[in-house]
Amino acid sequence: MASAVKGTTTAKSIESPVRRLWNHLAEGALWLLLVAVALVEIAPISWMISTSLRDPKHSFDLPPDFLPTAFHWQNYVNVINSPDIEFMLFFWNSLKIALLVTGAQLITCSMAGYAFGRLRFPGRDLLFGLFLASLMVPATVTLIPTFILVRDLGLMNTHWALILPGVTSAFGVFLLRQHFKSLPEEMIDAAKIDGASYFRIYWQILLPQTGPALSALGIFTFLASWNNFLGPLLFLRDWDKFTFPIAIATIRGYMGTGNQSEVLAGIMISIFPILVIFLLAQRWIVQGAAITGMK
């Protein structure tokens, strides 16, 4: 028996280094794959940055340069100081709309998520099912009804035509409902024993615990509103009410005949604040997205 145990120990000691070698090789191959995918993803962004800093006549040089070969900052100056396009006015219009839509969704979705997740009332599950079903409806299907409603309310050519349709979302309600359901029941029971009302439980007990979910929803909502192109194109008419995506399309010119380096400079200006927000809050985005799968 001793010899059998010794033989088993010897086999394990021989097998263990081989297994560790295979694990290291597999890990190295995975890292190489991830680096290759990252380079593929970064290449278009790198080309956009380098081209925005290049002289316009070299915008489409072949083979393309993915690293800056010149620093032609005049492209950015021309975009910001354009006599034909009030670029910064469009920037502030987009910022105002995105902030109002984001703030409204954080309020309405958190209250609805609390109601669906923690309150009991007749038809709760049926109503929540209808909310989830609306996620499967493409936005283009609701475009004409939304246009008719905005027109009948007299909101055409105003920023309210872009703000009011975005004050809540089924995705935001679902995200926050999942987070509220994941919070311990004991906190609510203790608050009820102390005589707290439903609103006080929501406002003072549960809402402070939803930081990751609120941060994720705020970033998703801000991005969607900031990048909205079809809405302003459909509902707005006056030049001074247009938003940032309209400005970029205007710089591009008819049939893409505009200065491509300036177009990419405008896109870089629009991406920069979003990139900063994402880099600062990416941890909350991951946490908030993970919450949707928690019990």
Image (cartoon, helix red, strand yellow):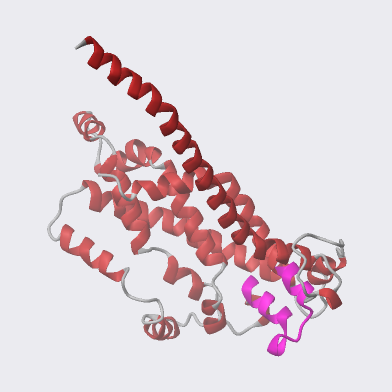
Judge whether residue 262 is colored magenta: yes
Q: Residue furthest left?
A: 122
> How many numbered callouts?
0
Q: Which of the two residues, 221 or 286, is positioned nearer the viewer here?
A: 286
Q: Residue at x 64, y 59 (%)?
A: 42
> Does the image show residue 154?
yes
Taking 116 as reference, is 260 left or right?
A: right
Q: Is residue 140 above or below residue 49?
A: below
Quadrant of the image occupied by residue 54: bottom right
- Residue 179 locus on image (x, y percent): 32, 45
Judge whether residue 131 is colored magenta: no
Q: Residue at x 42, y 54 (%)?
A: 106
> Does the image show residue 243?
no
Q: Residue at x 68, y 75 (%)?
A: 248
- Residue 143 locus on image (x, y percent): 41, 82
Quadrant location, the N terminus = top left
Q: Residue at x 44, y 54 (%)?
A: 217
Instruction: Write the start and end of the magenta stretch as one range.
Output: 244-266
Taking 240 as reference, is 169 left or right?
A: left
Q: Which of the two residues, 234 or 79, is positioned nearer the viewer here?
A: 79
Quadrant of the image occupied by residue 258: bottom right
Q: Main secondary structure of the magenta part?
A: helix
Quadrant of the image occupied by residue 204: top left
- Residue 133 locus on image (x, y percent): 26, 69
Q: Is residue 143 above or below residue 178?
A: below
